[in-house]
Amino acid sequence: MVPRGEGYSMSGWNHRHILDLASFSREDYASVLELAERFRALPVTGARKIPALQGRLVATLFFEPSTRTRSSFELAAKRLSADVMSFSPSSSSLSKGESVLDTARTYVAMGADVLVVRHRSTAVPQQLAEDLERAGERTVVLNGGDGLHSHPSQGLLDLLTLARHFSPQHPMPEALQGKRVVIVGDILHSRVARSNLWALTACGADVVLCGPPSLLPDAFEAFVDAPPPGFSVDPVPVRGRITIERRLEKALDGADAVMTLRLQKERMGQQLLTDLDRYHRDFGLSHQRLLLCGKAVPVLHPGPVNRGVEMTGELLDDLKICLVEEQVRNGVPTRMALLYLMAAAESAAESSLVSSSS
Ligand code: CP
């Protein structure tokens, strides 16, 4: 049965805004995966909508370009019967000098229940959430990707994709336990890598990071060692390990899955890479390179892909190995789960307010 807003147990879910995955417990990951899996099982033809978010308004405020995340959130909201408002920076009043905060407030004034926010600067979604809290607004913020910091829905859809690969019958966090997941490429500029580090290690995977020092500083080995910001104790008692291997051949040896990341030239303040051919030779994936894993392993990439740089075009087109399209497919039910959980948490808060005042 797919939840309709009142029947699904969300015991322990206490995230009002979703700004990053650092604060997620293993139970939180389980809630998202379980719900996403239910939404994934909805028929792909015929009546695709359920009325869970009927009467709610979701606004997608993407101040930075996006193909996948924005469309996927909008489709997810529509499948849950929410109204959707979309915002385009180039045709908005930003060009007349209106601030990001005032833009967001405009959508709140129109009754937005959820703001999905993407911005090139770290912490913009958090600042908006704090501003809404100060103003006593009930609108919640969902981070659609901020600077180098976080891309929580991408981390979660990657988790669902891997859990489904390792355990198709029971795609839950434990499917990742003890797996060796290699993340290769531009880790330094990747919010996707950071979200995946929190998610994968929380589910017990050991992560091997691979890239040149200019794109992968040594400090990443200790990324999850300290409690997340704002926590005195990590909400995940035992995490998988993070190690760094500079040579792709060593990183791939024994891997269970490989995730490669886009070279994010737009975020490189200085010329960190001079030779794309050399990067592809040292860190690019190909069918031949994958033989080093010693077994058949899936390849993930959050997209958009630089064809022939992060991986060969032949590998990108090989849907038996490359799960890029599967990741996109899993994005919709994952985002439905997030929107559903946020709306259900808000309804629970509203009813407790009503019952305490009556
Ligand atoms: N993976 C991802 O965030 O893609 P978009 O930039 O197209 O949303």
Image: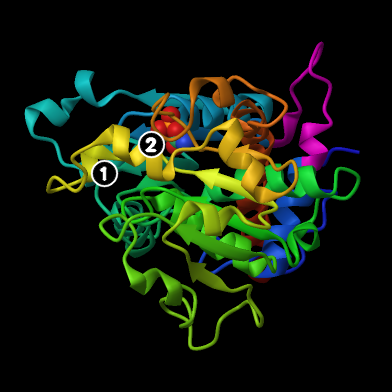
Residue 139 makes an appearance in the image: no
| Residue annotated with mark 1 | 120
- Residue named by callout 2: 280
Secondary structure found at label 2: helix
Q: Earlier in the sequence, mark 1 or mark 2?
A: 1
Amino acid beneath label 1: Arg
Q: Is residue 120 above or below residue 138?
A: above
Amino acid type for the residue under numbered disc 2: His
Which residue corresponds to the image point at 41% horizontal and 25% vertical from the top-left? 308
Q: Which residues are magenta?
A: 37-52
Which of pointers 1 and 2 indicates the residue nearer the eye?
A: 2
Q: Quadrant of ligand 1?
A: top left
Asked if disc 1 and disc 2 are in contact, CB closer than 8 Å, the reply is no
Image coords of residue 55 (percent x, y): 61, 31
Give the residue at x 64% y 22%. Answer: 318
Residue drawn at the location 68% of the way across and 58% of the way down: 254
**Quadrant in which residue 321 is drawn:** top right
User: Can see residue 157?
Assistant: yes
Q: Residue 73, image x and y in percent?
A: 54, 32
